[in-house]
Image (cartoon, grey):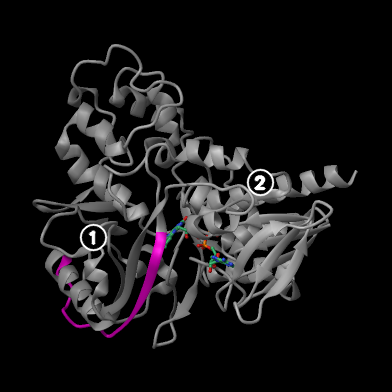
């Protein structure tokens, strides 16, 4: 049985790893020169290695306390012992008087304090299966200030998107489910938080040598000879005997690959292009672009936070900052402070059109204004992620379910376009897709 996985990000590699575990001959076809997608560890000019994309992952499901799929994968790859915990986990948000801790008892910034809410709705807040923009619901129940000061910056930190555009069901599914039972939003928040197991150990961890190590270990487990980089997949169609034909490579020099099963672990637009001949889908999914500036500054005293979020609409250009070497002690070097600053929100990408040097200047100036760090970069690196973060609009889970329902057996979708942006969600999505494709092919061959 030959399975082709299109896309060598963490979802595609997790799919390939699972398909190989299940006995398939698996091939990963990746358009860029290297696998990893949004997981990439790079050297700074001084040689220090930092993550230029994702920097950490949740090691457990906060709702159930179960080890997350990403932790399980790290464990299977023999890397659980390489995971390191942050020294400081608490983040802040920039308020009118400076940095303020993200209040306890909130869920993605939504408070559970009943005193903040007007009268209960006359029934559950959401009908079963319904969806709503997070901003719309929170504004209606708790007022605009909660959205602007807390919820919007928190969602912006994860999705580089705006609360008014993002689906409750896709971004905070546990809360969406509770809203189908409770007549108040604060009651739903409290119920979700109360259901969580008490665990004070850090939720997010990283690999001491960078998350690129997870990609290297996955690629080695799949087999380097099974991974084909620099090969865009341009077309997918049915071949004879229930097989699939993929057209791979440049338009001038295309190559055909035959497969018994296919996992598409790529963003929404290329998925829609590849499905055009097979099971046309309209996922209506936009993407936000961001830039990350990693900057070393002369050592400075910093507040006891892992970093901070910046509400939109103020005079600062940056969206968020992480005090990298306060959060992760293994990155600490004497005489310097290492920070990672993120710029760019969905619909406000003009700042990203500036050259790298300007982005570094903006990052250094905003950090200086907010936390008083020196206005001098010792070294810096700018990483641009164009069209990187999916903006799940209300109704996203239903659109994904509809796209999946129309797929022929032996073809599956995985990754951040479908099941959540977090690394654990991408790993789970890849593994589930691989299991479904392998099972379908086995059945067709029986
Ligand atoms: C800046 C940034 C920071 C983040 N930080 C975190 C974090 O700290 N923790 C966390 O959990 N998550 C984080 N995320 C989210 C997370 O990293 C991503 O959602 C996840 O890595 C996506 O994995 P994926 O495999 O679905 O997609 P991708 O990583 O996008 O991989 C898809 C791959 O498919 C390839 N491809 C596309 N089209 C084709 C084609 N036609 N043919 C062949 N190949 C193709 C692409 O080149 C790419 O390599 C962050 C994301 C970004 C952008």
Compared to residue 130, the image places residue 25 above or below, namely: below
Ligand 1 closer than 8 Å to label 1 CB: no
Disc number placed over residue 348 in the picture, else none? 1
Please give the count of numbered marks on the rendered protein. 2
Residue under the image location 62 percent in, 60 percent down: 12
Compared to residue 177, the image places residue 399 above or below, namely: below
Task: Estimate how packed mark 1 is, as few (under 14), some (14 to 19) or many (20 or more) residues with alpha carbons within 10 Å.
Answer: some
Query: Which quadrant, please, contains the C terminus?
Result: top right
Res 176 quadrant in image? top left
Query: Which quadrant, please, contains the N terminus?
Result: bottom right
Res 8 quadrant in image? bottom right
Residue in front for this viewpoint, 225 or 340: 225
Compared to residue 221, the image places residue 132 above or below, namely: above
Q: Does the magenta stretch include residue 387?
A: yes
Compared to residue 362, the image places residue 203 above or below, namely: above
**In the structure shown, which secondary structural element does the residue marked by tag 2 occupy?**
helix
- The first of marks 2 and 1 along the sequence is 1
Left or right: where does residue 131 sit relative to residue 429? left
Residue 410 seen in the current view = yes
Task: Estimate how packed mark 2 is, as few (under 14), some (14 to 19) or many (20 or more) residues with alpha carbons within 10 Å.
Answer: some
Q: What residue is pinned by disc 2?
A: 432
Spot the residue most to the right: 446
**In the structure shown, which secondary structural element does the residue marked by tag 1 occupy?**
loop
Left or right: where does residue 35 sit relative to residue 303? right
Give the extent of the magenta segment: 371-388
x and y percentages locating residue 343 in the rendered image = 27, 65
x and y percentages locating residue 61 in the rendered image = 52, 42
């Amino acid at each position: 049985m030959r399975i082709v996985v299109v896309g060598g990000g963490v979802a595609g590699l997790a799919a390939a790893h699972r398909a190989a575990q299940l006995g398939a001959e698996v091939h990963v076809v990746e358009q860029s020169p290297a696998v990893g997608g949004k997981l990439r560890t790079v050297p700074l000019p001084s040689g220090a290695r930092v993550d230029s994309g994702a920097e950490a992952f949740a090691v457990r499901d906060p709702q159930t306390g179960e080890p997350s799929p990403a932790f399980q994968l790290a464990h299977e790859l023999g890397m659980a012992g390489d995971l390191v915990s942050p020294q400081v986990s608490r983040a802040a948000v920039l308020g009118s008087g400076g940095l303020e801790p993200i209040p306890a008892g909130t869920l993605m910034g939504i408070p559970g304090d009943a005193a903040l809410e007007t009268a209960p709705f006359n029934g559950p807040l959401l009908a079963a299966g319904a969806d709503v923009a997070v901003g719309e619901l929170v504004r209606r129940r708790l007022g605009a200030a909660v959205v602007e000061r807390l919820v919007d910056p928190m969602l912006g930190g994860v999705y580089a998107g705006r609360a008014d555009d993002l689906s409750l069901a896709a971004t905070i599914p546990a809360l969406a489910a509770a809203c189908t039972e409770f007549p108040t939003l604060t009651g739903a928040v409290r119920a979700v938080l109360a259901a969580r197991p008490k665990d004070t150990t850090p939720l997010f961890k990283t690999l001491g040598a960078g998350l690129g190590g997870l990609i290297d270990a996955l690629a080695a487990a799949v087999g380097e000879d099974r991974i084909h980089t620099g090969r865009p997949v341009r077309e997918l169609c049915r071949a004879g005997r229930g097989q699939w034909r993929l057209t791979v490579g440049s338009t001038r020099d295309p190559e055909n690959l035959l497969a018994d099963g296919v996992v598409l672990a790529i963003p929404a637009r290329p998925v829609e292009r590849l499905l055009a001949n097979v099971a046309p889908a309209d996922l209506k999914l936009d993407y936000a672009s961001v830039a990350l500036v990693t900057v070393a500054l002369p050592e400075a005293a910093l507040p006891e936070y892992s970093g901070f979020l910046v509400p939109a609409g103020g005079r600062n250009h940056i969206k968020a900052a992480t005090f990298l070497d306060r959060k992760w002690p293994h990155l600490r070097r004497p005489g310097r402070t290492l920070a990672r600053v993120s710029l760019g929100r969905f619909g406000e990408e003009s700042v990203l059109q500036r050259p790298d040097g300007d982005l570094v200047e903006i990052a250094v100036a905003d950090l200086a204004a907010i936390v008083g760090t020196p206005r001098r970069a010792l070294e810096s690196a700018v990483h641009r992620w164009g069209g990187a973060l999916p903006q799940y609009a209300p109704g996203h889970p239903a659109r994904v379910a509809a796209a999946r329902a129309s797929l022929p057996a032996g073809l599956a979708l995985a990754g951040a376009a479908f099941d959540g942006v977090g690394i654990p969600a991408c790993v789970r999505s890849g593994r589930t897709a691989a299991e479904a494709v392998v099972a379908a092919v086995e059945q067709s061959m029986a």
